[in-house]
Image (cartoon, rainbow, N blue to C red):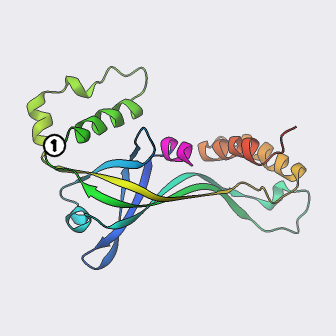
Amino acid sequence: MHEIITTYGFATLTSIHQGSLTATHLPLLLNEDRTELIGHFAKGNRQWVDIEGQEVLVVFHGPHCYISPSWYETQTNVPTWNYLTVHVNGTVQLMKDEDPRLWQSMLNLTEKYEDTTSIYELNNVDPGYISSLSKGVVGFTISIDRIEGKAKLSQNHPKERVERVISALTKLDKSNEQSIAKWMEKKSLPKE
């Protein structure tokens, strides 16, 4: 589950805002000891105003794809969807202004998502510009109270069928399908 959170860090955070369910899509980082998620809202996104102390649900969507029954040895099946997902329940704490964890999380996000050949470094941006932009965000942590994962990877099918699905997915030039095939190889096929 931690691998899914780390690899697919763009998540959906759901809370109650002004009496209604509200969701925001944003990148989140798992802290080193895997007990908290760290992120930030744009101040213009008012979901942060009443989120302090709330239990929230965060959904990390891993790869997912359609599974065609045409890949099976029989036509007596129906289509399905393979996917990986992780749900995190936790309590939100807003960061105070100038909390060093906010800047560190921004550095960590940039480092994580910048291409290894990129010459961009957030630390090289004019500090005055960074300071003005930082006033437009609200940092937060989510203490992880419960974490649940779901991996639907055709594991309920016989080995031969799983192998057919993997073969069909690897022939498709689509990243989700390629990822699901790799996860199926790793998790659905019995170890020999």
Instruction: Find out whether residue 4 is within the magenta segment.
Output: yes
For mark 1, give the secondary structure: helix
Q: Position of residue 189 (x, y in %)?
A: 81, 45
Q: Which residue is mark 1?
A: 134
Residue in the foreground of this view, choosing between 80 and 33: 33
Residue in the foreground of this view, choosing between 69 and 16: 16
Residue in the foreground of this view, choosing between 117 and 171: 117
Which image quarter is the C terminus in? top right
Q: Main secondary structure of the magenta part?
A: helix
Instruction: Give the residue displayed 79% in from the left and 50% down from the top.
Output: 165
Q: Amino acid at mark 1?
A: Ser
Instruction: Give the residue displayed 52% in from the left and 54% down from the top.
Output: 61
Extreme bottom residue here? 19
- Examine the rendering and report whether any part of residue 171 can be seen: no
Figure check: 58 above or below 4: below
Instruction: Give the residue displayed 36% in from the left and 52% down from the top.
Output: 26
Q: Position of residue 158 (x, y in %)?
A: 88, 55
Which quadrant of the figure has residue 80? bottom right
Q: Position of residue 17 (x, y in %)?
A: 27, 72
Residue in the foreground of this view, choosing between 171 and 130: 130
Q: Is residue 3 left or right of residue 110?
A: right
- Examine the rendering and report whether any part of residue 96 can be seen: yes
Question: Which region is colored magenta?
Answer: 1-7
Instruction: Give the residue displayed 91% in from the left and 57% down from the top.
Output: 73
Which quadrant of the figure has residue 90? bottom left
Instruction: Find out whether residue 162 is within the magenta segment.
Output: no
Q: Position of residue 163 (x, y in %)?
A: 84, 46
Q: How many marks?
A: 1
Pointer 1 local density, CA inside 10 Å: few below 14, some 14–19, many at least 20: some
